[in-house]
Amino acid sequence: METLENTLPKIDGADVRYYQGKEDHPAMIEMYNLIAEHADVSERETEENFDANYANLRNCNPYEDVILAEVGGQLAATARVAWYEEMDGTYVYPTIIAIHPDWHGTPLAEAMLDWAMGRARQISAGHPAEVQKFYQGGGSETQTARLAMLERYGYEPVRYWYEMYRDLSQ
């Protein structure tokens, strides 16, 4: 019989565990901000924003749908899965992978994505079989390792976002 614990990926040199609550937030925020800095993305996480986000997750039980991988006591990666239904009835399963820049292109990154996709399949089994279902992932154009990994897994670009600024002094 499969238990929740034996669904965790086995990764050489890494301790992988489920999200344990707010006590995980400081390390997650620090890593997410390092990832954003490395990718030259201006948006940064704050404790207040992060806590509010996790307190209001929809279609995601963080204690079953979020995992963390630590190497040498330092957070190296996280994976989170959720789901939503489009207006046309299509089900979408975001696989949100955050990999510390030092671990891009490693088996750790792929193991986290493998876990997220597997968890999404488990969740999707409880949804109507006759509807279309898709994984969803993403990243900034500067996150080349992440985008390359997603493409190797069959993800294709379907939408683009732009961040635009205008000086208010003029």
Image: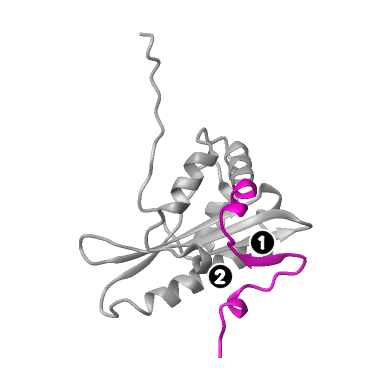
Q: Position of residue 77 (x, y in %)?
A: 63, 56
Considering only vertical position in the picture, is 86 above or below 6? above
Determine which quarter of the picture holds residue 90: bottom left
Residue at the disc numbered 2? 115
Does residue 156 appear in the picture of this structure? yes
Q: Residue at x 45, y 65 (%)?
A: 61
* Residue 76 lies in the magenta stretch: no
Magenta-highlighted residues: 1-28
Q: How many marks?
A: 2
Tell me which numbered mark, 2 or 1, is placed earlier along the sequence.
1
Determine which quarter of the picture holds residue 88: bottom left
Q: Position of residue 84 (x, y in %)?
A: 33, 62
* In front of the other: 50 or 85: 50
Q: Amino acid at mark 1?
A: Ala
Label 1 packing within 10 angstroms: few (<14), some (14-19), many (20+): many
* In front of the other: 24 or 2: 24
Instruction: Decide if residue 160 is on the left or right side of residue 99.
Output: left
Determine which quarter of the picture holds residue 13: bottom right
Q: Residue furthest left?
A: 88
Mark 2: which secondary structure?
A: helix
* In front of the other: 107 or 14: 14
Q: Position of residue 159 (x, y in %)?
A: 35, 49
